[in-house]
Image (cartoon, grey):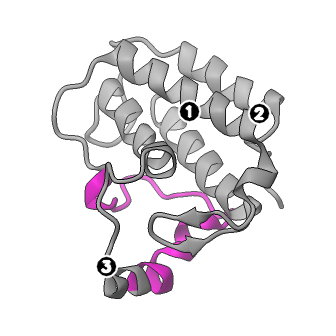
């Protein structure tokens, strides 16, 4: 079953509505991050797309390992399990400003929707090489859904 398309206005705005239900005091139902760290964590996916150079790209050997061992867990429709491992770039240990991270995430979601599916078909991923629009959609959709569910919205 295909995941709903993050490239549609309806789905993107649905995520934004869920994000807008969060407050700085919203508690996680599992995991170690607070809500501000979770928003910053979700922003990393978009930083890798829209801010080249912010996160060092993996070397050729690591990229091969990521393609072989991680890619199918990230780009398929199978949901993430609770408390699963995450890549070092996605680990947020410092305190983050809730409003800043929230605004950034909403902006990234809207930008992705406005650019549309065609912009992502065959686009190079930071870690996995070229991905189809469906793979980008699955990656964005299930990551956001996983963490918003983690915080009860």
Mark with earlier residue (3, 1)? 3
Q: Quadrant of residue 113?
A: top right
Circle 2 sits on which residue?
11
Q: Nearer the viewer, residue 90 or 84?
A: 90
Mark with earlier residue (2, 3)? 2
Whole-percent x, y for residue 6 in the image: 73, 41
Whether residues under marks 2 and 3 lie with C-beta atoms below 8 angstroms apart, the answer is no
Circle 1 sits on which residue?
108
The CA distance from mark 1 to mark 2 is 14 Å
Residue stretch in magenta? 65-89
Quadrant of image for the C terminus: top right
Q: Residues within 10 Å of mark 1 (few under 14, many from 20)?
A: some
Q: Residue at x 48, y 58 (%)?
A: 81
Mark with earlier residue (1, 2)? 2
Whole-percent x, y for residue 21 in the image: 55, 13
Residue 153 appears in the figure: no
Circle 3 sits on which residue?
59
- Judged from the image, the secondary structure of the residue bearing numbered disc 2 is helix
């Amino acid at each position: 079953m295909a995941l709903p398309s993050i490239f549609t206005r309806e789905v993107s705005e649905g995520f934004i509505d869920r994000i807008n239900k969060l407050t700085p005091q919203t508690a996680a139902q599992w995991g170690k991050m607070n809500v501000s760290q979770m928003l910053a964590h979700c922003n990393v996916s978009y930083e890798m797309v829209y801010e080249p150079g912010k996160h060092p790209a993996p070397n050729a050997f690591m990229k091969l390992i990521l393609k072989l061992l991680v890619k199918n867990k990230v780009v398929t429709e199978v949901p993430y399990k609770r408390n699963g491992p995450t890549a070092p770039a996605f680990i947020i240990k410092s305190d983050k400003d809730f409003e800043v991270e929230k605004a950034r995430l909403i902006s990234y979601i809207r930008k992705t929707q406005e650019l549309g599916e065609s912009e992502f078909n065959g686009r190079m991923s930071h870690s996995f090489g070229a991905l189809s629009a469906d793979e980008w959609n699955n990656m964005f959709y299930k990551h956001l859904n996983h963490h918003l569910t983690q915080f009860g919205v």
